[in-house]
Image (cartoon, rainbow, N blue to C red):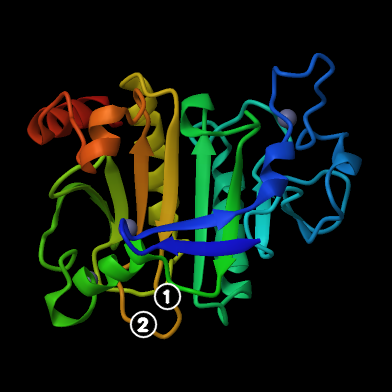
Amino acid sequence: MEFRRDPLRLIGVIVAPERSRRPHEGKTKEFRCPFCKGNEELTPPEIARFPGDGEDWLVRVIPNKYPIVPDHEVIVETPSHEADIDILPGEHLQLLVRVWYERLKAYHSKEYVLLFRNYGLDAGASLVHPHAQLIALDRVPDLVEAEVRGLSGDSCLLCGGYATVLVKDDGCAVGVPNVQAFPYEVWIFPTKHARIFEPSEAFVHLLRRTIAALKRMGIKSYNMVLHQSPRSRDYHWHLEILPRMGRLAGFELGTGMRVLHHSREEFMEQFLRFYR
Ligand SMILES: [Zn+2]
Ligand SMILES: [Zn+2]
Ligand SMILES: [Zn+2]
């Protein structure tokens, strides 16, 4: 593993040749999903399983077989190949979100820990089976460093109404950032300033309904990133849900800008119609 930062374009690059060996569903004829129940022997030895250590697991934590950095875990979210957040039973989703919290906490001494999910082929997932990934880094990524400047102290933008709140539940909110960087982008965040992700019931409730609403709106692929505080810094944690419709193309790559085909207002109105 090697880290490089381009001084001209300020882009960080990690060279991880292992990644090229990842299996891709559909590319090999006799594909056996390593995350499905019964195929546990296809993954590296597991770090933890929940609940307990019985055969009937709901969530498994394993090291990534093709890591981007040395600390790279996969959280297999369900034994079933096609369940997503919007259809998992309530207790299962609550357990899963608790596991996110526990695994993030396990790396508290690292400079930065990122939890993310790629759902659907357009979101870059090499396996359809729902899973999250966690990466612990020795440096704070530039993008997070920029967010620290906007989300700390008395001038925290999220505390100051940066996101328009669409739905609220017991200290947690679903909101649309002032400028959406992706079509249909939404965030979930605590209404009160907090550095560390809190797996509350309200969060679970909003997460399930938000994903369900986006799917009703026709979203098939999305990325999720959980941004919590870098080590010993102030911050306002939030979950970014980034639907993927279409790809970044020449204009986006050549300018660093994005093109949205709808207005923020149109999106908000539509979201609320599909949210239940
Ligand atoms: Zn599977
Ligand atoms: Zn804040
Ligand atoms: Zn963020």
Element marked by disc 1: loop
- Residue 98 visible from this viewpoint: no
Q: Position of residue 225 (x, y in %)?
A: 43, 51
Residue under label 1: 230
**In screen coordinates, is 221 left or right of 166?**
right
In the image, farthest residue toward the front:
8
Are the residues tagged 1 and 2 within 8 Å (C-beta)? yes
Task: Pick whichever, 178 or 254, lies toward us.
Answer: 254
Quarter in which the C terminus is drawn:
top left
Q: Position of residue 198 (x, y in %)?
A: 44, 66
Dot 1 amino acid type: Pro
Examine the rendered structure and indicate whether residue 41 appears above or below residue 173.
Answer: above
Examine the rendered structure and indicate whether residue 255 appears above or below residue 240.
Answer: above
Crowd class of label 2 (few under 14; some 14 to 19; many from 20; radius 10 Å): few
Examine the rendered structure and indicate whether residue 200 appears above or below residue 66.
Answer: below
Element marked by disc 2: loop
Picture quarter containing residue 242? Answer: top left
Q: Position of residue 31 (x, y in %)?
A: 80, 22
Task: Pick whichever, 238 or 90, lies toward us.
Answer: 238
Crowd class of label 1 (few under 14; some 14 to 19; many from 20; radius 10 Å): many
- Point 12% across, 76% down: residue: 155
Picture quarter containing residue 103? Answer: bottom right
**In screen coordinates, is 166 left or right of 209?**
left
- Point 20% across, 40% down: residue: 255
Q: Position of residue 85 (x, y in %)?
A: 52, 37
Residue under label 2: 233
